[in-house]
Amino acid sequence: MSDQITAPPREAEHAPGQSAPGSMPSAPVLPPTETETVVPTAVGDLGAIVRVPAQAAGPVPGVVLVDGSGDGDRYAWGGWPEWLAEAGSIVLRHDKPGCGGSPGHWTQQTLEDRAHETLEELRVLREHPGTAGQPVGLYGISQGGWVALLAAALKPDAVDFVICHSGPGTTPAEQERDRIGTWLRAEGHDEAAMTEAMAWVDRRFDLMRDGTTPEALLAEQQQFADRPWFGTALVPYDSEPAIAFISGMLDFDPRAVMPDVRCPVLALFGAADTLVPAHTNLRAYAEHLPSDVRHGYAVFPQANHGLFVADPVEGVDRRDQLAPAYLPTVTAFLADQTAS
């Protein structure tokens, strides 16, 4: 009798989204949703939005977005809430004080004020039923990285993880000196101009530390108004509120708070970032965070401060311009945090 090859029986066909006959119904897939809420803070209620990703019903980790420098409101986050939600999290974004119709003004805050504000936002997200029993952490972009690290150091038991996106590992004064010097060199100024410009940068920091009024500082720097480097070295030190705000954080050193951060940290940098040099700042994290196998570090080739590898182009989805490994890296880190 010859051998006979028998094909395995086919499973009964059924419509997409339906369970096979006789099987248990699958959990429904829910569409993404966004819900307005508020975050109570020292200056009043800040407007906020919670984005819940499309998912099978069940809790997932929570991520609080912590904005960088300048104005910022809950409607101006571009694709980040969507991308981070799709990476496996419920995302809360919020107004900075004085933005989006919220009270107060961010220029009147210190970094510690921002850290306490961020901890309140984290508390609100932790109370969301979609994060029940799951870790809740912070995603700090640029200056927001300082804020996220400080919040995690101030209340280690409250912050389950931190993602620092182009977050400096040096003081604001060091970071700003690096930025201005890099931008001036890229403009091609000669050595004499570079020396004069950087001498003024250092002098301006000294005046800010010594308590010189913003009005007096603005008047003094006008002596350089005819220099070819002046415009680049001026911003953002071009208004009294901005100078006062920066003076309050100038010598904050994240390396001093990193040893008190007890949660996993993912530090992400762009190799082409001209604001926060990748390797200098990554080294600060690696040397000053407590040793922890749960930490992660990544430098994305050709990526800029926003971790994009190209400038915006009309008709091109911004998501497609992210560093290719960015979303897989964040998705994997969030999956590692997920409670079983």
Image (spheres, grey):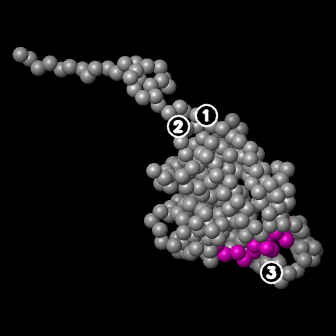
- Which residue has dot 2 on it? 56
Residue visible at 69% across and 35% down in the picture: 315
Residue visible at 60% across and 41% down in the picture: 53
Residue visible at 84% across and 70% down in the picture: 243
Residue count near mark 2 (Cα–Cα under 10 Å), binned few <14, some 14–19, many ≥20? few
Spatial CA distance of label 2 from label 1 is: 9 Å
Spatial CA distance of label 3 from label 2 is: 53 Å
Q: Nearer the viewer, mark 3 or mark 2?
A: 2
What x and y, as percent, mark residue 288? 55, 75
Observer able to see residue 265: yes
Residue count near mark 3 (Cα–Cα under 10 Å), binned few <14, some 14–19, many ≥20? few
Q: Mark 1 falls on what kind of element?
A: loop
Instruction: Tell whether position 243 is magenta.
Output: yes
Specify the amino acid type for callout 1.
Pro
Specify the amino acid type for callout 3.
Arg
Specify the amino acid type for callout 2.
Ala
Mark 3 and mark 1 lie on one chain; the one further toward the N terminus is 1
Q: Nearer the viewer, residue 183 or 112?
A: 112
- Give the farthest residue toward the top: 1
Q: Nearer the viewer, residue 161 or 146?
A: 161
What segment carries the magenta color? 242-254
- Which residue has dot 1 on it? 31
Are circles 3 and 1 on residues that touch, CB within 8 Å?
Answer: no
Are circles 3 and 2 on residues that touch, CB within 8 Å?
Answer: no
Residue visible at 60% across and 51% down in the picture: 62
- Which residue has dot 3 on it? 209
Q: Nearer the viewer, residue 53 or 71?
A: 53
Q: Is residue 186 left or right of residue 16?
A: right
What x and y, as percent, mark residue 257? 62, 74
Mark 2 and mark 1 lie on one chain; the one further toward the N terminus is 1
Does residue 90 lie above or below 2 as drawn?
below
Mark 3 and mark 2 lie on one chain; the one further toward the N terminus is 2
